[in-house]
Image (cartoon, rainbow, N blue to C red):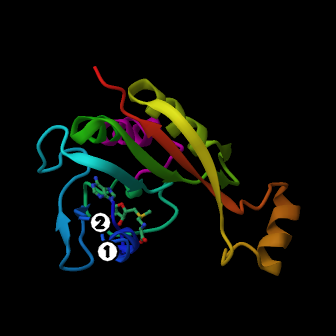
Amino acid sequence: MCGSGTTIDVCKEEKWKVLGFDIVPYRNDIERADARNLPLDDEIADFIFIDAPYSDNIEYNKHPDNIGNISCEKEEFFIELEKVAREAHRILKPNKNIAWLIGDHWRKKSGFIPVGFKIYTILEKYFKPIDIITVSRHNQTSNTPLWHKRAKQYNFYLRGFKYLIIMQKVSR
Ligand SMILES: C[S@@+](CC[C@H](N)C(=O)[O-])C[C@H]1O[C@@H](n2cnc3c(N)ncnc32)[C@H](O)[C@@H]1O
């Protein structure tokens, strides 16, 4: 779920060996693969970072296996992301960490959906919690007069942060 590949760039800067995958790769150093079925052996990764879609709010691409085309208002969204969590657990070495970036969701029709807490609950089935970090959005697009007006009109809070959930694979 590499997207534009920011994570790969950071790893390269840090001189870490990195493999990046996406259902629709945006550049040559990202390999095409479904995050639910990665072309990797069991327990080979020292660290996993996942920036999964938060719902269908951004159209990344029209690929039929893009989980970002499923709304988080549907249970199916979380069922598919649980498969991603299971696959991450398979490839991660014991005692190593996974970090999962995720944001919450608000829509007029569905109201507030705590996507971050729901993902936390899924991850807890497979991993041991280490920490939760809130990542604030300094360049956030919702900090505009239009969004302030909408928030007052429809009575919701502007979301200025994401969760970075850190978990560990416990050894068997
Ligand atoms: C939140 S974006 C990643 C944003 C990224 N961190 C960036 O800097 O642009 C989510 C990505 O998940 C990818 N994706 C959705 N379903 C997928 C799947 N089943 N397997 C692999 N990647 C998938 C989408 O193509 C999209 O690029």
Tell me, yes or no, whether the two marked residues, 1 and 2, touch with CB atoms within 8 Å: yes
Furthest-right residue in this view: 152
Q: Which quadrant of the figure has residue 66?
A: bottom left
State the CA–CA distance, disc 1 to disc 2: 6 Å
Q: Amino acid at mark 2?
A: Trp
Find residue 52 and report its horizontal and vertical position in percent. Answer: 42, 55
Q: Residue 16 bears which disc, if any?
A: 2
Residue 5 as seen in the image, left or right of residue 73: left
| x 70%, y 54%: residue | 108
Give the magenta range: 70-84
Disc sitting over residue 12 in the figure: 1
Is 79 one of the magenta-colored residues? yes
Q: Is mark 1 within 8 Å of ligand 1?
A: no
Q: Is residue 30 above or below residue 35?
A: below
* The image quadrant in which ligand 1 is located: bottom left
Q: Quick one: quadrant of the N terminus?
A: bottom left
Q: Quadrant of residue 43?
A: top left
Q: Secondary structure at mark 1?
A: helix
From this view, report whether residue 90 is shown above or below residue 103.
Answer: above
